[in-house]
Image (tube, grey):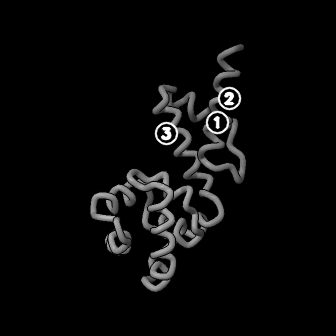
Amino acid sequence: EEMKMFELLTSVSKIGPKVGLSILSFASPGQLGAYILSEDVAKLSKAPGVGKKTAERIVLELKDKVDKNNVEFEPTLLSNEPIAVSKDEAVDALVALGYSSAEAKEAVDKCKKDGLNTEDIIKKSLTYIMSKSLR
């Protein structure tokens, strides 16, 4: 699956093996397929080495090819990130910011709501941690 997506990515003009690998390290093939099908240039441009124009080129050149090659997709990514993934990513991000694992899990559990993406969960969790430390 990764090899198929790598070959698709490197078939896009001005995308070589280095950028192709960095894009695959940024998101799974299923996520990339969902981003391409939903024309989510904003998320694609967050990958290392990919700017807005490159992301637009990826979407433009691969939108039709992705369907033809039957790459497996994670349909939940077309609407929102799965809540469990968002929660885990939020905890990992808070731990990377220097908070303890227990503190991060507590904050995320208090702040997670259905429909929130990872970024929003992190923001709410940081607000919760800061308000808790001011008491």
Residue carrying label 3? 92
Q: CA distance from mark 1 to mark 3?
A: 13 Å
| Label 2 packing within 10 angstroms: few (<14), some (14-19), many (20+) | some
Q: Is residue 18 above or below residue 66?
A: above
Task: Single out the residue that lies furthest toward the top.
Answer: 135
Q: Measuring from the top left, give residue 55's x and y in whole percent.
A: 48, 62
Side of 37 relative to 57 (left or right): right
**Residue 123 disc label:** 1
Q: Of marks 1 and 3, which one's residue comes earlier in the chain? A: 3
The amino acid on which the numbered mark 2 sits, given as a three-letter code, is: Thr
The amino acid on which the numbered mark 1 sits, given as a three-letter code, is: Lys
For the point 51% across and 26% down, the residue is 99
For the point 61% across and 38% down, the residue is 122
**Element at label 3:** helix
The amino acid on which the numbered mark 3 sits, given as a three-letter code, is: Asp
Residue carrying label 2? 127
Q: Are marks 3 and 2 in contact (CB under 8 Å)?
A: no
| Label 3 packing within 10 angstroms: few (<14), some (14-19), many (20+) | some
Q: Measuring from the top left, give residue 67's x and y in whole percent.
A: 50, 82
**Element at label 2:** helix
**Element at label 1:** helix
Residue depth check, mark 1 versus mark 3: number of the one nearer the observer: 1
Residue depth check, mark 3 versus mark 2: number of the one nearer the observer: 2
Q: Are marks 1 and 2 in contact (CB under 8 Å)?
A: yes
Q: Measuring from the top left, give residue 98's x and y in whole percent.
A: 48, 26
Side of 24 relative to 56 (left or right): left
Q: Measuring from the top left, give residue 26's x and y in whole percent.
A: 42, 54
For the point 58% across and 35% down, the residue is 105
